[in-house]
């Protein structure tokens, strides 16, 4: 009963000055709408950039880091392991470096039992030279199971000519990065000669070209079948250097990578550690969004603060009358604070709606097409958490903006006012 | 005394500041239930100040005030507000209605605040008081659209809605023409006749003449307490505390 009469007074006063109330509300409305819009768009941009960068890197990468055991040395046996002698070797060099994963088959079998893993792609990678007339162009040759590789890196969408499956059907086929193919001046159907640093060489037929949109990949990389590289390097069929893994949930990468490192005894890296710039970029864009939105909300808050102060200054007499009739300070505070809150709740709700409409509209705007972008529309993410945060911020801002004027109103001395 | 509704003892009030000055000097006062008292005196002698003290709006004073057996001096703001709401009806010189509300809403607000009756009962009572004041047609008008005399009647109706123990008025006709002044005088007289306790500050000797007792103030003290020269015109039989149960003075 008591609360309802306060609210009755509050809402009647609010409606009596519609224009002022609407202006105060518009501040909150635009603040929240921009918050939603920018958050949704920025998150879309973050995801797009992350996807693009992640498209060229696996979630987890297991490989043999060159890490040589220097605790024993041939010098020791040369000196007959005399315990009286201490051996100090400067700049030791290893006897023999092995780059492959020794128990690759067992590791692959074990990984296949893990439910968190979506795709496993083994790799044998080597440096090669592409013969181009009299010069040789440096590149990387990846021997892969092209079906798995395609699943991890979405090769299908990145093919400029040919398809990944051509590798399976063609004898000694190769897929070239588009930039590399341009440099070598070859196209689908042409032959290229690849040479290893060890001196072996082999001829391959170009069965397709691809582009990731990253020159570091497109200008140096070529795909052939795993067996081809093993043959080129004269290795066994279980000789591989890397295992790349795609997970169902990329946020689990860090934890799993650590687990695999311990379990298999090889270097195991997650995408986050190898690409800190992705996270940093996300963070910078996120902070920017927050700063802009909080600034807008602060401005809206000051608008409400000003308007409420003006309202209260013009309502001194009414406050005195209400007090004379038995309303106490807390009632007066409730009356004016609820006016701010109504402005806040309405402004925030409409702001959420406008924010959604703007985000939706942007998500329907076609993205300018280029060779290297794979986006049809502007990237926008719809996430209920932003809407929840927007509502909380809008209401919190108006509450804070309303508290001080309402407290001032509560403290008005009715006698001073009634005396005139 | 059983019959005393208001008792003020040794009230002192000073304004501090650059020019300190004592407005009320040792004022003691006792009002019986059903009494109609007018306070007169020159402008600036402290009449309004005294009324603000008695109505509990002003708490910055020395002395004690007791109404209806409750000692009000020293109570918290919250309790005083509650007490005013229930027991004191206040009429100001400049009618002071809330401009955004209709006449009816203005009258109902103190009762809605009290919350003793359901809304439709309050509305019914408010309409009845309006009828007795002869301004029932204005019920749904915005209060700002009324003439001064009508507004003052609405203010009186509002003061009556919670059936208060005491009605206090600070120069209720100070701002009105003589026709409206007469109407207001009559209303007060009628209220008194029905057993309401009234304390009214006035400049008007004629009005004071109709009260049971005149308190004359001079420079912050009560000068004389005199019976009015002429006894008030006999009215209807007094009834306890219900304003205008039936007939109306204003056809
Ligand atoms: N806030 C104040 N500060 C100082 N003096 C005041 C204040 N309010 C009123 N006064 C003085 O107190 C005296 C009594 O005022 P008031 O009670 O309004 O007189 P009345 O109602 O009898 O005309 C006046 O002289 C007035 O100037
Ligand atoms: Mg006065």
Image: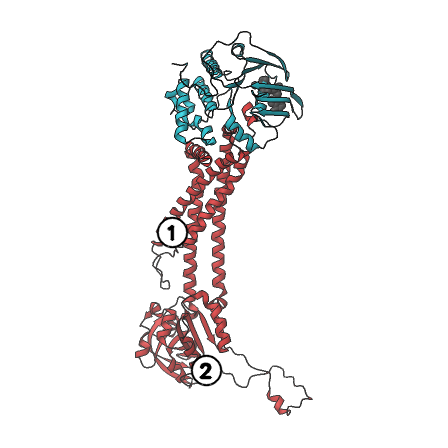
Residue A211 left/right relative to A257: left
Residue carrying label 1: A359
Q: Quadrant of ligand 2?
A: top right
Relative height, residue A110 to residue A325 (above, below): below
Residue found at the very far front of the displayed protein: B2
Q: Using the rendered image of the protein, determine whether residue B111 is visible from the camera's viewpoint.
A: yes
Report crowding for label 2: few under 14, some 14 to 19, many 20 or more residues within 10 A (C-alpha).
few
> Is A278 rendered above or below residue B80?
below
Tell if the residue under mark 1 belongs to the same chain as the one under mark 2: yes
> Residue tagged by mark 2?
A103
Estimate the x, y position of residue A40 in percent, counting from the top left: 41, 54
Residue A178 appearing in the image: no
Q: CA distance from mark 1 to mark 2?
A: 51 Å
Q: Colour of chain B?
A: cyan
Q: Residue A332 in the image: x percent, y percent?
A: 51, 34
> Please, which residue is most extreme toward the right here?
A84
Which lettered chain is shown in red?
Answer: A
Q: In the picture, which quadrant includes the C terminus of chain A?
A: top right
Coloration mode? by chain
Q: Chain of mark 2?
A: A
In the rendered view of the protein, which quadrant contains the N terminus of chain A?
top left
Residues B67 and B57: in front is B67
Q: Compare residues A5 and A131 and report the one nearer the observer.
A: A5
Residue A242, horizontal then vertical, whole percent: 44, 77
Residue at x-position 53% and y-position 30%? B81
Tag 2, which secondary structure?
loop
* Dot 1 alpha-carbon crowd within 10 angstroms: few under 14, some 14 to 19, many 20 or more: many
From the viewer's side, name the closer residue of B81 and A54: B81
């Amino acid at each position: 009963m008591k609360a309802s009469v306060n609210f009755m007074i509050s809402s009647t006063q609010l409606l009596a000055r519609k224009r002022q109330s609407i202006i105060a509300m518009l501040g909150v409305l635009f603040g929240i709408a921009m918050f939603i819009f920018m958050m949704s768009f920025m998150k879309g941009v973050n995801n797009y950039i992350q996807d693009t960068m992640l498209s060229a890197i696996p979630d987890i990468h297991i490989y043999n880091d060159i890490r040589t055991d220097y605790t024993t040395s041939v010098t020791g046996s040369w000196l007959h392991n005399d315990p009286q002698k201490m051996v100090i070797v400067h700049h030791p060099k290893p006897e023999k470096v092995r780059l492959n994963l020794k128990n690759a088959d067992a590791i692959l079998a074990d990984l296949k039992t893990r439910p968190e893993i979506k795709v496993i792609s083994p790799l044998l990678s080597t440096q090669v030279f592409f013969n181009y007339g009299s010069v040789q162009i440096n590149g990387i040759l990846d021997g892969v199971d092209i079906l798995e590789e395609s699943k991890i890196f979405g090769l299908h969408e990145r093919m400029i000519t040919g398809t990944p499956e051509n590798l399976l059907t063609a004898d000694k086929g190769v897929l070239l990065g588009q930039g590399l193919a341009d440099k070598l001046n070859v196209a689908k159907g042409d032959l290229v000669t690849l040479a290893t640093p060890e001196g072996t060489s082999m001829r391959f037929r170009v069965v397709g070209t691809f582009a990731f949109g990253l020159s570091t990949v497109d200008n140096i990389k070529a795909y052939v079948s795993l067996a081809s590289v093993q043959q080129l390097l004269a290795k066994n069929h279980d000789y591989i250097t890397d295992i790349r893994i795609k997970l169902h949930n990329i946020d689990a990468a860090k934890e799993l990578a650590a687990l695999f490192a311990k379990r298999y005894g090889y270097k195991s890296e997650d995408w986050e550690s190898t690409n800190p710039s992705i996270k940093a970029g996300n963070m910078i864009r996120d902070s920017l969004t927050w700063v802009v939105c909080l600034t807008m909300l602060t401005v809206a808050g000051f608008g409400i603060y000003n308007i409420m102060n003006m309202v209260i200054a013009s309502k001194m007499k009414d406050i005195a009358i209400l007090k004379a009739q038995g309303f106490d300070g807390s009632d007066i505070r409730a009356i004016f604070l609820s006016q701010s809150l109504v402005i806040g709740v309405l402004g925030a709700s409409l702001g959420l709606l406008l924010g959604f409409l703007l985000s939706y509209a942007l998500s329907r705007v076609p993205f300018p097409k280029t060779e290297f972008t794979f986006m049809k529309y502007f990237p926008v993410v719809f996430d209920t958490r932003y809407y929840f945060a927007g509502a909380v911020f809008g209401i919190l801002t108006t509450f804070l903006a309303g508290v001080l004027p309402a407290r001032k109103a509560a403290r008005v001395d009715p006698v001073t006012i009634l005396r005139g | 005394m059983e019959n005393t509704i208001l008792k003020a003892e040794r009230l002192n009030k000073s304004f501090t500041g650059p020019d300190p000055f004592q407005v009320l000097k040792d004022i003691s006062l006792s009002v019986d239930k059903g009494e109609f008292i007018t306070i007169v005196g020159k402008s600036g002698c402290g009449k309004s100040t005294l009324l603000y003290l008695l109505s509990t709006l002003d708490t910055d004073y020395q002395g004690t005030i007791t109404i209806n057996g409750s000692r009000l001096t020293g109570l918290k703001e919250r309790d005083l507000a509650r007490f005013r709401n229930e027991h004191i009806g206040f009429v100001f010189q400049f009618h002071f209605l809330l401009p955004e509300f209709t006449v009816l809403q203005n009258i109902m607000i103190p009762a809605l605040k009290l919350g003793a009756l359901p809304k439709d009962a309050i509305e019914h009572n408010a309409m009845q008081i309006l009828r007795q004041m002869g301004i029932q047609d204005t019920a749904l008008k915005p209060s700002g659209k009324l003439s001064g005399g009508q507004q003052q009647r609405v203010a009186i109706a509002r003061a009556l809605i919670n059936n208060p123990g005491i009605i206090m008025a600070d120069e209720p006709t100070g701002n009105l023409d003589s026709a409206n002044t007469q109407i207001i005088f009559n209303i007060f007289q009628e209220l008194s006749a029905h057993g309401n306790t009234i304390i009214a500050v006035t400049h008007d000797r004629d009005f004071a003449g109709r009260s049971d007792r005149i308190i004359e103030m001079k420079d912050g003290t009560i000068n004389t307490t005199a019976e009015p020269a002429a006894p008030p015109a006999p009215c209807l039989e007094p009834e306890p505390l219900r304003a205008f149960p039936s007939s109306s003075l204003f056809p």
